[in-house]
Image (cartoon, rainbow, N blue to C red):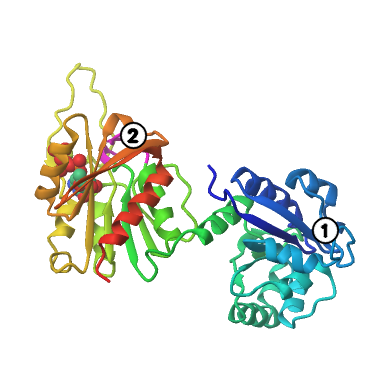
Amino acid sequence: MSDLAGKHIVLGLSGGVACYKAAEFCRGLIKAGATVQVVMTEAAEHFITPVTMQALSGRPVYSSQWDAREGNNMPHINLSREADAIVIAPASADFMAKLLHGRADDLLSLLCLARPIERVPLILSPAMNREMYAHPATQRNLAQLRADGAVVLGVGAGEQACGETGDGRMLEPDELLQELIAHFQPKRLAGRHVLITAGPTYEAIDPVRGITNRSSGKMGFALARAAREAGAQVTLVAGPVALPTPRGVQRVDVASALDMQRAVQASADAVDVFIAAAAVADWRPASAAERKIKKDGSGDVPALAFVENPDILAGVAASPRAQQGALFCVGFAAESHDLLAHAQAKRERKGVPLLVGNIGPDTFGQDHNALLLVDASGSTELPRADKLSLARALVTEIARRLPR
Ligand code: CTP
């Protein structure tokens, strides 16, 4: 992945135990293609050495405003103007209090103050003890920093290095990376609410058995991430899959097609876009046994009767809001052959403006895929790529088709 190719990040560390996470975050930035200039406060150097950060970033660390390595002796000007973003991770309570007042008595606070405010975003990842985080002074400072144009990220909850439990932990390196990558994505879905189904469904036969399919949920989850990166509010209704929830996405876990339908119906009236990426089981056992079905030793197999599941997508697409164009519906089709013809027929049958075709065996469980978009005016191919790239391209195609 080279999501940050061409981006130059100033990574600032202020003092806190979470400095150890900044080391891994720095590695993640480099892996994602960014160049990284680390700047540390004196307090940060008590927690992690500049040697580590230099080794990981591949550049000498700056920590003094008097650093004479810069020809003009103005590291605060040079470093802040080169940056595509300044990320402070960890941002300590003290450091943020300082920023709030425009104080600039060390290199990191100085370059934050000196940054061209319209062009270089300042992203703060707070990290502190839960009492410090909850303190009215800190909360007041966070609100004011936001009002002054900084992006203040959330914090994690849970066990803290001090032994207490609560809000205030710094985000994990991967969460921070997702936030930064999202920051640079165009906000094509700002102000929109997107509902997505993903994964398989599980239709119970009895309390220990059921039927399902091989959908991994990866495409639906990638779409949820891409829609959120594009600025949308995202609700993800997920069948049973073992995937982490993309940051900032509201996830509703379901098992059966009927559960999925209920969850979708609970949100459908409030959303602008519905993307049905789930591989919903077409049939379910007519009745699930309350107790485990036992072998009786006779060699007879149980007779299973099936009933058809409701078509969730077709139901939403037939709703008045979808018919009036206020709710844009997107369907998926997993086919084994004659993709274009089947996708066209399915688009008509489901009554959706856009249908995304793919070859089932080529996508289930895979990290890559290729998509064929079919709408009223014809078809477009999104060539083979990783699912997140395809999801971003699909989000762009959807955004282009939405009413303004
Ligand atoms: N879908 C749905 N509810 C169902 C079945 C399918 O919402 N009960 C949605 C899927 O999420 C997908 C689209 O409909 O967006 C196509 O699903 P698919 O299973 O490929 O189509 P079917 O209508 O089942 O057609 P067929 O089995 O003939 O391929």
Q: Position of residue 191 (x, y in %)?
A: 37, 71
Q: Is residue 309 left or right of residue 88?
A: left
Q: Secondary structure at mark 1?
A: loop
**Res 268 quadrant in image:** bottom left
Residue 335, above or below 314: above
Query: In the image, what residue occupies the spot 68% across and 72% down?
Result: 133
- Residue 364 is marked as 2
Q: Return the disc, 1 or 2, that comes first in the chain's sequence.
A: 1
Query: In the image, what residue occupies the spot 34% across and 46% down?
Result: 239
For the residue with label 2, is its CB less than 8 Å from the closest atom of ligand 1?
A: no
Q: Position of residue 188 (x, y in %)?
A: 38, 63
**Res 158 quadrant in image:** bottom right
Which residue range is magenta in the image? 203-216
Q: Position of residue 2 (x, y in %)?
A: 54, 44
In this orientation, does residue 267 appear?
Answer: yes
| Residue that mark 1 sits on | 62
Q: Tell me the mark number nearer the camera, choosing from 1 and 2.
A: 1
The answer to if 133 sits in the magenta stretch is: no
Query: In the image, what residue occupies the spot 29% across and 61% down?
Result: 400
Task: Kindly identify the amino acid type of the residue bearing the numbered disc 2.
Answer: Phe
Residue 377, above or below 31: below
| Ligand 1 shown in quarter | top left
Nearest the viewer among 241 and 15 is 15
Nearest the viewer among 318 and 324 is 324
Task: Kindly identify the amino acid type of the residue bearing the numbered disc 1.
Answer: Tyr
